[in-house]
Amino acid sequence: MSEKQPLLNLRSIAKAFPGTQALNGVDFSLHAGEVHALIGENGAGKSTLIKIIAGLYQPDDGVIEIEGEAVEFHSPADSLAHRIKVVYQELDLVPDLSIAENVFLGNLPKKAFRTVDWNELYARTSELLQDLGLNIDPEMPISALTVAQQQLVEIARALSRQAQIIIMDEPTSALSQSEIESLFTVIRRLQGLGVGIMYVSHKLDEIYAIADRVTVFRDGEHIATEAVANTRQSDLVTWMVGREVKDLYPRTPGQPGDVLLEVDSVSGATIEDFSLKVHAGEIVAVFGLMGSGVHNLGRLIFGNLPRTGSVRLLGQEIHANAPMDAIRKGLGFLTENRKSDGLLLPLSVKENITLVSVNNYANMMVINGQDERRATAEIVDKLSIKTPGIAQKIRYLSGGNQQKSLIGRWLLEELKVLIFSEPTRGIDVGSKAEMYRLMDDMAHQGMGILVLSTELPEVLGIADRIIVIRQGRSAGRWISRDDATQQDLMTAAAVQLDPAS
Amino acid sequence: MKTSKTFLFMALLVISALLLGAFGAMAQDDDAMMEADAMIRAFTVEDMPEDWTLPESIGHVTNYLVHEWYQNETKAEAATAEAYGIEFSINDANLDLQASLAAVDDYVAQDVGALVFTPVDEVASSPAIRRVARDRAVVCEGTAVVGCATLVAISDYTAGYQVGIWAGNYAIENLDGEARVLDIGLPALTSTVARSDGFADGLHSVLPEGEIVQSVDGAGSKDVAVQVSADALTANPDINIIFGINDDSALGGLQSYIAAGLDTDSLLVVGFGCEGIACKNALQEGGPYKVSAAMFPEYQGLLLINASIAVFNGVQPPPQIYAPSQPVTLDNLFDYYTQEEDGTYTALLDVIAEIEIEIVDPPMDDE
Amino acid sequence: MAAIPVGRKRHQNGAMRWSRLLFSREAGLVILLLAVVALFWILEPSTRQQRVYWDLLREISPNLIAAIGVTMLMLAGEFDLSIGSMLAVTGVTTVVFFNSTENMWAGIAAGLATGPLVGGIHGYLVTKQKMNSLVTTLGSLFALRGMVYVYTNKMPVSDLIGFWDFQDAYYNNLGPAPLPFVLAILLVILALIVLTQTEFGRNVYAIGGNETAARVSGIRVNLIKFMLFVICSSCAAIGGMLLTMQTGSGYFNAGGSGFELIVIAAVVLGGIALSGGKGSLVGTVLGVVILGMTAKGLRLMGVNTNIQLMVTGSIMILAVFMHSFHDRIAILRRR
Amino acid sequence: MVGNRSDSASTGIGSWVTRAVHWLLHTQEGVLFLIVAAIWIFLTVQSDVFFTGRNIGVLLSQVSMTAITAVGMTILLISGEIDASVGSMQAFVGVIVMSVLNNTENLALGITVGLALGVIVGLINAVISLRLGINSLIATLAMLSIVRGAAFGFTDASIQNTHKIQTFTEIGNGFFLGVPWPVIFFFAIFLIFYFVLTRTTFGRFVHAVGANPEAATLAGIPVRMVKLAGFVLTGVLASVSAIILLSRLNSGQNGIGAGFELEAIGAVLLGGTSLSGGEGSMVGTFLAVVLLATLKNGIVLLDINSSWQVTVTGLIIIVAVLLDARRRRRMGQD
């Protein structure tokens, strides 16, 4: 450890919420010019810690020290005053304000009578953005930017406050590989300027790429802090899940059966002329970068977006624009946006799980409560969803358990093919492994699985056959699991794709 | 209840003082006023003085045209104006004070010869009316507003007093001399307060032990009246007289009485206005609704147009031109109206014009 | 990737701004207003006089002033339904103080003070107690109106002293312009400067656009919302003061015929999104004028009040549809 | 989560009591129930006539119109939409049904026409909100004006009862086994839709489309149809209220129903239904409606100045929302 005074030092921080002890006396320190990664499964207490540092929560116990001095944060303003800036996972931008106003939000340059100094604002924003390699008009509304550009605006916001401590919460979750690379470049530059960066992520490879030290939390406890160079990936995983995860990708391919799903020259949204087939007992993956259209593909096949071309399930045509028809014929779709497109947050676990299949427990529209509860309980058991009861509101479950509930929603239907769009986005390592095992099981039971993903290790680990999608078209041929290499897929996906545009 | 009475009284006092102040200066010549009053009661243009000119247009700002009273009255105004060859138009404020005052401005912008004004609120309309009345003939309808050249209205207190006497006598003859009254009033307007007061005083003049058991605010509309009277009737199921400051209030009270499952044989309902079909039908049914203080909108419409013409010609009428009122019952209804085949009623204007009214003044020293 | 000189960019933006203006919501509203005026010009001869328009400006002044506060509040994503009842609270308070203190300024001060008082209560309940503002102010719509009813016993409170200056001010003019409208426009300009040129104003937009973002950026969301509730009720109080001048009395039922709905309709017509963060005060002004002109035109034509309602309702649907259509075009243009 | 273990262990009365206490203290319905109970006890002590069959009958039949409309509004609000046009519907349906009855003397026809009007206005609301994509609050506020205008366009006078159909008068004023018919309608409608909302797939879909329309679409639920059904249902139930009101007033009146929408929506919100959709309770609506009616009834029974009705209604709304907000914060929901 460095002998220098740390920029930020958190000692035995504790925070409880009704029913849970979110943090139980954890420590964390951050030095100038350091990238210190914080990892842990969902529910480990990472986001609670971030919110405490940001001044959104007040700790029940413990000390926060900035350069050796104990401080108390009563509001985000206090935290910002100590030049701490959090770059949140879910982007905190105001869509209808200009880029410049977003960068300087809460801190606009002013002239006489507390009016905004627009010239100063735009000039300084231009400078900051150019520093980050972003050459855009600061007067444009933020909604005109791509997600990656918005991410950079968030970082520009941190720079605008001359933050000396920047906390990045899952900064790469919406970025493509090349965009991640340019983010890392920015991080290294900030490091050189003496900024301390707390880097929160699920992606272990990123930690090896960028971080100096790593701290692991589990269930609100501090487990370990080590120099990254001295740790192996398997150690990290063991610390996070509290046991050894031998094989994250348990795929044991079986013999593919008949063709179940046939997608023939489908076009629509950003997709042009895309075809694929999924056989029984097979896991097929479509890999693409963000913006490649890989997510739209799922919606086109499922009939949630207008399309041309044909989609057949067991030879039967699935109508465009009618998810109902797809479901009736045995096709399911697990969306990539769990919160916005999947969960019914105000409703119970039961109601979320039986959303699609509720008709099966109903006679003349009247629901048989007993049947429904029994079916739900079976699913909860089978997927080992952690919940105090099936009547619990789903908003209180962790991300992984929410995702499992959403899968459970489809398991109650007699499906032939299930489309998984980003099956493990935002869930922790332990749940990931369970998720993959589940997909493997489903394939062995004769279902066809179609995975749409932007995560390369996942695609390589779980799929039997892979195709790459680039700018809405298939890029290259089908590759079998055994022939696929990280290099090939990345090249196919990224070539000709300008990250900044 | 005591404080509210005092309050009412104070307000009445203030308003009368204001009225007196406004008209005091002009009250030089009673004879001239009586003459004006007589001229206003003329029936045709021929009966009017030869040197009078007719305004090109007359506008009427009403406050609640949904009500049958205003519909029948404005119909009569329109018919009279048409007979005279005057352009007549109506603008309805629909109980919105702002809209009412804006409508006054609009008539000024249209440069109407004379303005008939029914206030949404008598006090709040006064500044606007005073301003407009400086160079324009403004005649108030129903309720007095300071600034109007004159008011065309019945004597609310008198009309209430008359039906009060009628009700008292009825109670003596048919209700064993017992009168326990539910008063469905409207405290917002002085005219409707005067109706309730007149009724109570009239009743007491023949039946001193008669009792106003409860006074509720029916807002002058049937749905509110039904609601508030239903609760009042459960609190006091022995009520045997319902008085309403208009027919809707009275009929609403009756409706609640029926819905409460009470015996309608021992009930008397006293209405006010009898301007529309509802009252006349109810009288003919022979149920508990036996009497209403009729105000004859068909004749008031005519008076309003005549008064407007008089003021337009610079004549100073008395502060109030009393329109006829009369307790009507099934016995005398057809003295004043004939019923047409389609069920509608036609007013017999010449009979109505002959009704003699003796104004009863409210006691001023009632504390 | 060379940096573009700042100067050139400015220039470019000038052209961009003009095209933005041309395709803005406000441009659509101006066209709608002109269409309404032209229609009445053709149909009703009396609308061809100047004084009709001066009358119009005078009569919409209370609504306009109240709409300023509602706009600012709605931009931050909150609501106030109680403004109609505020008119009565202010009026009655003012006149009661006229009569008891016999001092005009004391009455005016007391009347205007009701704004911050009621707004402060709303602000406290919404920001500290985390109550939903729509339901809270629905409650105070009834509570305030009821208190006025109880206090006045539904009798108008008249100015017994006779502050004629106070009453005349409503009908006085500054040059050709009605005094109330001059006041309203001054307040509009002030609010416009606050909203577009000060940090406070930009923070209002930020809160409405993304409250979490505003919060984590150190913007004191609760304080700003509290102030907006105070501003909104105060604007309604000023509106109520104008009505008190016009009527020379405290009317218990002032604003009781759906004043809040008329104002909110005008604000929505002006393009303020119900979800907050979007729209401009200029739109609100146009919205108030369009609704006022429609009502006035129909009144001058002698159209029945309830038919007026139908026309107003249809115009609202048309305008809101126009806005949503405009939003879609704007998204297309951006692509 | 610790408590659950002991719940399953303790059986019978113990767990029942625990659950009842939880309901009373930790739900909006429970809080409302406690307020209603307190006021009922107070009024029973204060007034001899309050807790009599007749007064309760009056109280409930007074509120039946608001209640029936509020039942539809609860469903609509849970589905994430709102209908402000129900106030004008009271006038519009009233004048038309009365005139149909007068002209045809056919009760069934009159009621059918009334319900059909509910369907039509509901459909128009649905088309404007769902098809044109206009926020339903704004769309139906506009419809509030338009429907009122239509009522006035139909007739400028109130329409008196000239058909004298006895059964029609019974609808609003009659009794069945000593219980007023409006109360029977109200309870029947409440029970039916309580069942529909909590025990049927339609009810489930209503919750789903309100909670997350996109998720509902992806689950194969016809979101627009469900919302449309909500609009139509609200329209029809507003018509039912209008017909009962018509019978009680015995005449079709143009001016009635102003502010009725605020009363109905206010009751639903007071009952704990969320403005943002997905969450709501029919029982809460029921209790809220009864609470508001009790206040009005009590104020008249105690012969307090009726202006207090308005004040107290407002204050109760604020207090109930305050309690709910505090409860939510205690539960850590915000």
Image (cartoon, coloured by chain):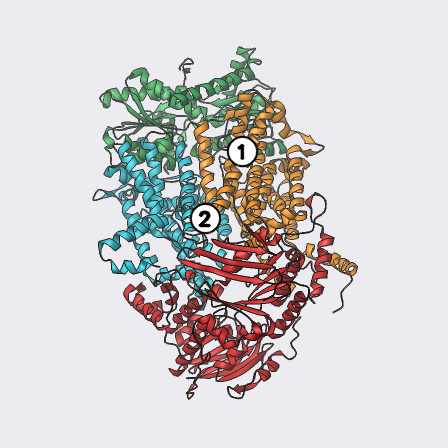
Chain colours: A red, B green, C orange, D cyan
Answer yes or no: is residue D84 visible.
yes
Task: Quarter of the image for the N terminus of chain D: give it.
Answer: bottom left
- Asked where in the image residue B226 lies, by quadrant, the reply is top left
Residue D18, placed above or below residue A321? above
Question: Which of B103 and A8 lies nearest the eye of the viewer?
Answer: A8
Q: Which residue is drawn at 44% across and 63% down?
A: D223
Image spot of residue A68 (x, y percent): 59, 56
Residue A498 to residue C13: above or below: below
Disc 2 sits on a residue from what chain? D
Residue B197 picture quarter: top left
Query: What numbered label is drawn on residue D84?
Result: 2
Relative side of A365 to C66, left or right: left
Instruction: Pick out the residue farthest to the left.
Output: D177
Q: Distance between the residues labelled 2 and 1?
A: 29 Å
Front-most of residues A363 and C38? A363
Under tag 1, what secondary structure? helix
Closer-to-camera residue (D248/B80): D248
What residue appears at the point 54 percent right and 26 percent down from the top-left corner? C95
Looking at the rendered structure, whether the residues under marks 2 and 1 are on a common chain is answered as no
Q: Which chain carries label 1?
A: C
Question: Residue drawn at (54%, 62%), measured in percent from left and top?
Answer: A28
What is the three-letter code of the residue carrying label 1? Thr
SS label for mark 2:
loop
Q: How crowded is mark 1: few (under 14 residues within 10 Å), some or many (20 or more)?
A: many
Q: Is residue B324 above or below residue C42?
A: above
Taking the image as drawn, is residue D220 in sight? no
Q: Which amino acid does label 2 sit on?
A: Ala
Residue B314 in picture, x, y percent from top left: 60, 19
The residue wearing badge 1 is C114
